[in-house]
C-alpha cells in the first residue's frame, strides 16, 4: 500500500511538473489600457517557404479598461494595418515560423481618435527572439508599448496552397 501511494505521489508530481504555464507579458505596475479582441491577416500572394509577401490586417479591440484611469474614454477600437510577412526558409509557413512587420491605425470609439502604430510578430528564432510587440507612435497612448497574447490559426488549406490567412482569436492587448 505504501509503495502504491509513493508511486501515485511520484506520478502526480511528474504530471504537474510537466505542465507549462506561459508567463504573462512584462508590464509596468499600472497599465494604461487593457482590451480583448481579434485580428485577421491576409497574405498576397500566399506565403510559401522562404518567401516575403504583402500582408494586410484588420481587427477589433473591445472591452477596453484603463487601469490607471488615464484613458477611460477609450472603450474599443478598430485596427487596419499593412506590411510584409517573411517565412523561414526550408519550413512550411503553416508551421507559423515567420516574421510579420506592420504599420497601421487604431481608430478608437466612441471618440474617433486615431493612434498610429507599428507592430512586429516574430516566431522565427533565427531572426531574433519570439515576440509580439506594438509601438504606439501617434495619438492616444503615444509612447506606449503594447503586448498581445494571441491564439492563432492558419487557413485550413495552408499545407496545399500556402499561408494566405491567419486568424488571431482570444487576443489580450495591454498598453503601458
Image (cartoon, rainbow, N blue to C red):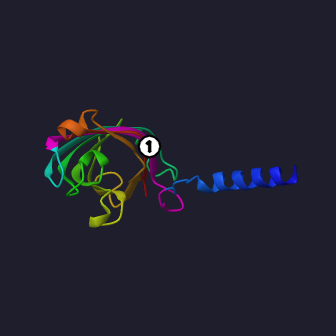
Residue 63 visible in image:
yes
Which residue is rendered at x = 28% and y = 66% of the image? 126
Which residue is rendered at x = 32% and y = 63% of the image? 125
Q: Residue furthest right?
A: 1
Is 54 left or right of 108, judged from the image as shown? left
Q: Mark 1 — residue?
A: 35
Is 45 left or right of 14, judged from the image as shown? left
**Residue 67: x %, y % from top left:** 52, 50
Identify whether 69 is placed above or below 44.
Answer: below
Q: Quadrant of residue 99?
A: bottom left
Nearer to me, 145 or 147: 147
The magenta stretch spans which residues?
A: 25-46
Element class at badge 1: strand
Q: Residue furthest top?
A: 156
Predominant SS along the magenta part: strand
Nearer to me, 15 or 68: 15
Which residue is rendered at x = 80% and y = 55% of the image? 6
Which residue is rendered at x = 71% and y = 51% of the image? 12
Amino acid at each position: 500500500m505504501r509503495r502504491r501511494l509513493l508511486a501515485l505521489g511520484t506520478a502526480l508530481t511528474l504530471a504537474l511538473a510537466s505542465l507549462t504555464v506561459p508567463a504573462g507579458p512584462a508590464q509596468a505596475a499600472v497599465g494604461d489600457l487593457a482590451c480583448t479582441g481579434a485580428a485577421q491577416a491576409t497574405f498576397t500572394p500566399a506565403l510559401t517557404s522562404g518567401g516575403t509577401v504583402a500582408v494586410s490586417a484588420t481587427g477589433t479591440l473591445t472591452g477596453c479598461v484603463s487601469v490607471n484611469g488615464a484613458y477611460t474614454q477609450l472603450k474599443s477600437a478598430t485596427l487596419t494595418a499593412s506590411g510584409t510577412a517573411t517565412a523561414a526558409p526550408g519550413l512550411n509557413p503553416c508551421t507559423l515560423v515567420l516574421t510579420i512587420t506592420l504599420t497601421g491605425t487604431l481608430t478608437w470609439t466612441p471618440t474617433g481618435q486615431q493612434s498610429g502604430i507599428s507592430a512586429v510578430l516574430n516566431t522565427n528564432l533565427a531572426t531574433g527572439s519570439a515576440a509580439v510587440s506594438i509601438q504606439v507612435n501617434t495619438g492616444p497612448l503615444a509612447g506606449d508599448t503594447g503586448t498581445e497574447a494571441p491564439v492563432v490559426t492558419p487557413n485550413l488549406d495552408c499545407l496545399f496552397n500556402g499561408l494566405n490567412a491567419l486568424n488571431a482569436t482570444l487576443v489580450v492587448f495591454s498598453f503601458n
